[in-house]
Image: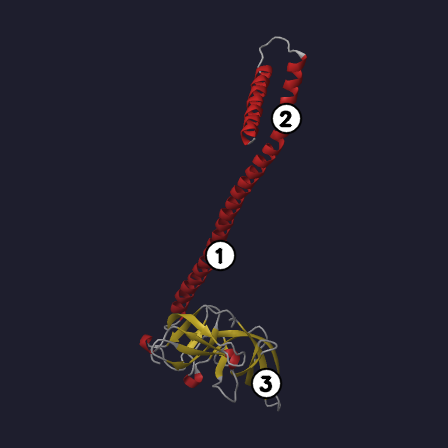
Amino acid sequence: MFKWFGNIRLIILMAGVIVFVAIIGFTYGGKGPMSAPEGFMKDTVTWMQGVLNKPARAVSGFFGDVRRISVLYEEYRQMKQTLTQYAKDTARLNDLEAQNKRLQDALGFTERQQQSNNYKYRIAEVYASSPDPLNSTIVINLGEKDGIKMNMGVMSVDGLIGRIVSVSPFFSNVQLLTDLDSSSTKAIAVTIKGNENESFGILEGYKREEQLLVMNKIPKTDKMKPGDVVVTSGMGQLFPRGIEIGEVVSRDEGEFGITHTALVKPFASFNHLREVFVIQVPDL
């Protein structure tokens, strides 16, 4: 019985092969006109090929799209890396240009100062600043090894900013003018540029809200007026003479009417300091 079923399967297989060969023969015919069975078989086979080709093309297109997406993603990733590097290079270039501008200004500043007096200006980099708004100090990268001493004046290219209050071998702390307080720090004796022998005052305070320095003990007969340039007088041996500080913006009668008080707008900015100068006087 099993042998008979085996023969049936063999007969079916051979019949299939014969039909397949016949189909090929029908569809492969020459250029002559086709018979009706040939046309039917050819149309049937062509239709079946189209039906089978659609999912094949869809699958092929899907994998092609995946491949293109992968290529596009890789191109996007590389472009993003390039743009990131470009942004970093641009930021670095801008920083270098700003630094170059500051150093050029510093060079011009020292050349002008050397022509006007015999002080020595040591350029220093601001290493750190205090985050406490009530403790206005910065740290510079010059110290005892560089000849820095206590109470030396410190300025930017715009004007006086403070004085040295502590020194270590390689670093120094600078107390800014914004920390001026007559009860806790040394005041600064000042005068008016171009009228040094007739004007006098003492800087001993800072109004944080207005960002103005307070000058006290101005004689009532002093001709000081708004717009005058305030400079160090050299009295008291704390700061050298003639260092510009700011401009008088107002003048009023003092608390007891004996002397006058003036408000001074500093020339220097006390924020974002990068390079400063320590003033070294030859006989200091």
Residue type for callout 1: Ala
Q: Earlier in the sequence, mark 3 or mark 2?
A: 2
The answer to which of 276 and 201 lies nearer the viewer is 276
Against 238, residue 87 (above or below) is: above
Nearer the observer, disc 1 or disc 2?
2
Residue type for callout 2: Met
Nearer the observer, disc 3 or disc 2?
2
Residue at mark 1 to residue at mark 2: CA–CA distance: 64 Å
Q: Quadrant of residue 116?
A: bottom left
Q: Quadrant of the N terminus?
A: top right
Q: Earlier in the sequence, mark 1 or mark 3?
A: 1
Name the residue tied to disc 3: 260
Residue at mark 1 to residue at mark 3: CA–CA distance: 49 Å
Name the residue tied to disc 2: 48
For residue 91, the mark is 1
Q: Earlier in the sequence, mark 1 or mark 2?
A: 2
Looking at the image, can residue 199 be seen?
no
Residue type for callout 3: His
Task: Give SS at disc 3.
Answer: strand
What's the residue at 53%, 40% (across, down)?
Answer: 67
Give percent across and percent down for residue 94: 48, 56
For residue 227, the mark is none
The answer to which of 262 and 275 lies nearer the viewer is 275
